[in-house]
Each structure stands twice: as structure tokens, then as C-alpha cells.
Amino acid sequence: MASYDLVERLNNTFRQIELELQALQQALSDCRLLAGRVFELPAIGRMPSTIRWPLFRWCSTSARRPWRAPCATTAICLSSSNRKTAAAKAAVTPAGAICLQVTAAEQQDLLARIQHINALKATFEKIVTVDSGLPPTARFEWVHRHLPGLITLSAYRTLTPLVDPSTIRFGWANKHVIKNLTRDQVLMMLEKSLQAPRAVPPWTREQWQSKLEREYQDIAALPQRARLKIKRPVKVQPIARVWYAGEQNRYSTPAPAR
């Protein structure tokens, strides 16, 4: 059980991140906007998993409006309150970029602010993943008990400043997370599912229970030292692909890049 002091540190660090992000947004809004563009997708409500997702067209906006979108997105990414009605697989983060003209002093100040925010994010992640002493399966419940609606990945993700890039293009970050497990770990997971039977569309509870029992038997028949992998898809989000011509180097950063 995490201590009261740890919970207080968790809440205080998160509040600091929110305050510093607000200060950064104000500092950015004081700079001269040279250009900006945001590609937005329409809001998507929840749909049954069996329904094929429709195709949507990007909506491109420019001028002053793109400035408000990336700023507002920070609050949405950290703590989303619309998840009861919004589709869990829908992209929340809009792809876009704002180009600002800054003096040397302003650039130094902005970079220092971003560095401080990233340090707070690293502290927050350490509190959750290390200081709490909780196994990965228990962290989600603990964090959301104290910070309801938090999107932990966005809270951990650092801000990436882009200084004089040659080009910025956008694509989709569509990949999988692979987790290595032992045979006994998988059997424990299946045992928990068997002890709490439920229906998983399009199967009934009895059909799903039968599938779990068959999978349990198949896994139990493997050698004890067998190494297993679980692959799950990561929520699709926009990604910015940045090119620096002088360095002949291109790298990708999660959108929105700040």
C-alpha cells in the first residue's frame, strides 16, 4: 500500500506539471506567430467492436485558430473527461505545427521551461513506476484512484522543442507493444479470467469461458521454461516526422511537438 506521503508527492508533482504547462502556453502565446496549421478529426462516439470504423476526412485549419488547438490539447491529453462518450480507439491528439519567431532570450527561456517540465514528468513517472513499489498491474488503479481520468502515457511523454527544422510532415504512429512472459505468468492471467467469467462480444459468457479453458490447456502443455509473448496494438496517434537538412537527419516525435 502506497504511503500518504507518496500520494501527496504524486498530486503535488502533477499540479506542478499543470501549472508549468499553463505558464509555457502563456509564454508561447506571447511570441509572434509566423504560421500554423492543425489537422483535426471529427469527434467519434463509442461504437460496438464488431462495427467497421468509417473513414473520415481531415479538416485543416490555419491562421490564429491552430494556435489555440495545440494549447488546449495539453489539458485533454493529461486528463480526459470525455472518455465516457468518446471512442477509446479514437485519436485525441491533433496533428499540427505552429511556427513562432523568438529572440535569443525568448528561445533560452522557452527551452528552460520545457526542460523543467520534462524533469517534472520524469519525477512523476518515477513516483508511479518505482517509488510506489506496485506491480504494473496495480499501478493503473492506484494512479486513477487519486487522479481520475489521467492519461498516464501523455503525463510521462516529454515535450520536444523543434528549433529551425527544414520540414515537418505528419503520419500515424501505429505499432504494437510486445510483452515477454513465462508460461506460469500466462497461466496465472488465464486463471484470473476463468475465476471472473464474462462475455466478450461476439461470444457469450459460456463460449468465452470455453475458449479460455482450451487456451489454458494449450499453455499448460508447454514446457515450464517456454518464453511467451503477448502483442497488443497501441492506440493510433499522429506523429511528426522532422527533417534537418544540415544534419541530414530525420527523426519522429509524438504529436503535438512543442
Image (tube, rainbow, N blue to C red):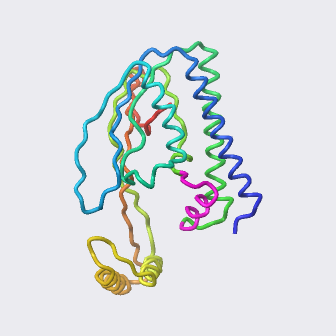
- Going 36% across and 63% down the picture, which residue do you hit? 231
Q: Is residue 249 left or right of residue 8?
A: left
- The residue range painted magenta reads 137-150
Q: Is residue 111 above or below residue 185?
A: above
- Going 33% across and 38% down the picture, which residue do you hit? 41
- Going 61% across and 23% down the picture, which residue do you hit? 27
Q: Main secondary structure of the magenta part?
A: helix
Of the pair 181 and 236, the residue shown nearer to us: 236
Residue 116 drawn at (x, y percent): 66, 35
Residue 30 drawn at (x, y percent): 58, 18
Of the pair 199 and 249, the residue shown nearer to us: 199
Which quadrant does the N terminus fall into? Answer: bottom right
Q: Is residue 173 left or right of residue 149?
A: left
Q: Is residue 11 above or below residue 139?
A: above
Q: Is residue 199 left or right of residue 34?
A: left
Among the 4 quarters of the image, the one containing residue 217? bottom left
Residue 143 drawn at (x, y percent): 60, 58
Q: Is residue 257 above or below residue 102?
A: below
Of the pair 51 and 143, the residue shown nearer to us: 51
